[in-house]
Amino acid sequence: DADVTQTPRNRITKTGKRIMLECSQTKGHDRMYWYRQDPGLGLRLIYYSFDVKDINKGEISDGYSVSRQAQAKFSLSLESAIPNQTALYFCATSDPTAGELFFGEGSRLTVL
Amino acid sequence: GENVEQHPSTLSVQEGDSAVIKCTYSDSASNYFPWYKQELGKRPQLIIDIRSNVGEKKDQRIAVTLNKTAKHFSLHITETQPEDSAVYFCAASKRLTGGGNKLTFGTGTQLKVEL
């Protein structure tokens, strides 16, 4: 089945370390997104991309950067991780005609 | 930007009862309103959505209603079952230039269906 795959699924790191979360998809979708989930805060958009040359900030982009290496790959980086970036991160895709988001399984990040 | 408020944050019902979750949005230009279900330890998945040109949509035991004038929409689950226990998120967006949606999510409702 076509899917959205995230790596790593779990990561524990220390304050100040650089972290990269990777997302790849076999759905053939152009649109890719990174969301952050915190208890009681729902899902908040970090960055989104419509194609390889298109990168857009979401509502909480400070402290994060992204790279769209190919249509199927979208990575999220934390250049210098801090404890309040501890969260569950989801990658998602969509196609331009339908509204549905297809989420990956999530990457749980803990910053000590 | 868009702001979506969701209530209640937790909801407990008896099996077989109905459950209603309500959301309000701020941007009158929003025209797409999906609902996602997230089971414990799983990814969110779309269960139903509605566009602004209709007032109600049903799919078996779930339905969504939209009141554009009041800028609120609701999820209704009838004949609840234990497998309906999950966190439910509402969201709102407007169509972006070039297609795609930039969804703003509510803060979620933890629904528990008790036997």
Image (tube, coloured by chain):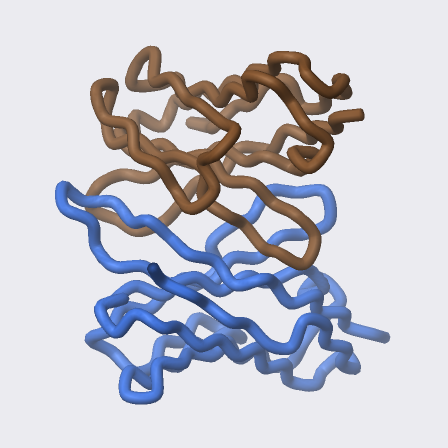
Q: Which residue sits furthest right?
A: B115
Tell which of A75 and B12 is nearer to you.
A75
Please identify the quadrant where the C terminus of chain B is shown: bottom right
**Residue B79's image quarter?**
bottom right
Query: Against A69, is A82 above or below?
Result: below
Instruction: Give the residue at x 61% y 45%.
Output: A37
Q: Which chain is drawn using brown? A: A
Percent position of residue B4, x then y: 45, 67
Percent position of residue B41, x then y: 72, 42
Tell which of B14 and A55 is nearer to you.
A55
**Residue A19's image quarter?**
top right
Instruction: Give the residue at x 33% y 69%.
Output: B50
Percent position of residue B26, x then y: 36, 73
Q: Which chain is drawn using blue? A: B
Percent position of residue B18, x then y: 64, 84
Instruction: Give the residue at x 69% y 60%.
Output: B86
Tell which of A19 and A31 is nearer to you.
A19
Q: Which residue sits furthest left?
A: B98
Q: Judge left or right: residue B11 versus residue A72.
A: right
Please identify the quadrant where the N terminus of chain B is shown: bottom left
